[in-house]
Image (cartoon, grey):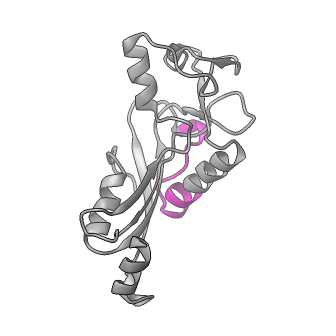
Amino acid sequence: MRNPHHIGRVGKYGEMCAEAGLVSFHFVNVTDVRPAVAPWRGSDARFSTNPVCIAIPGPEPERPIILDMATSVVAMGKVRVARNKGEPMKPGILLDGDGKPTTDPGAMYGARRGALVTFGEHNGYGLAFVCEMLAGALCGSGTLRPERQGRDTATNGMLTIVIDPSRLVDREWLREEMRR
């Protein structure tokens, strides 16, 4: 998917694929926004939360296996909720505008904006970078370069890979294997 506006919750695409009996992998990036996530050991934001979704039909049709996650410790929506409630974030989630750890969600909304931290240190950073390359560069929607930041909109790129599991294994065997 190249250059749509905000595509919403990525897990919905995975749910649709799983309902159709398909396995799917979704890698997403966002441009035309202010970056929100610092690279591992970095002090300022360079990425969006670059979501990843992996969906697998479950052992029962109404119970698919859906992994839908941001590559940051939390999604920006969680920071917004904490800020609106006047509540601090847990330690280890945010950096202030100077790159120092903070629990103040307001750090993400000031003139000197802070950054979210990637989950799993270098692992989350690596996955965020791969999302940027697959969804942004490979799909042709572009990456979050400095000239594509802060336009007060959200432009997504998404690479989706869909697999029909019956091309690989017997579906009944797969369901039973998953159930067990």
In the image, taking residue 179 as reference, residue 15 lies left or right, namely left
**Residue 135 falls within the magenta-colored stretch:** yes
Q: Is residue 1 visible?
A: no
In the image, taking residue 13 as reference, residue 149 lies left or right, namely right
Outermost residue, front side = 180
Outermost residue, top side = 86
* Residues shaded magenta: 133-147
The residue positioned 41% from the left and 68% from the top of the image is 24
Considering only vertical position in the picture, is 166 above or below 129?
Answer: below
The residue positioned 37% from the left and 13% from the top of the image is 85
**Residue 77 falls within the magenta-colored stretch:** no
The residue positioned 51% from the left and 31% from the top of the image is 34
The residue positioned 30% from the left and 60% from the top of the image is 15
Where residue 147 appears, x then y in whole percent?
Answer: 56, 37
Where residue 167 appears, x then y in whole percent?
Answer: 40, 89
Considering only vertical position in the picture, is 128 above or below 36?
Answer: below
Where residue 56 appears, x then y in whole percent?
Answer: 39, 68
Out of 25 and 21, give the one closest to the viewer: 21
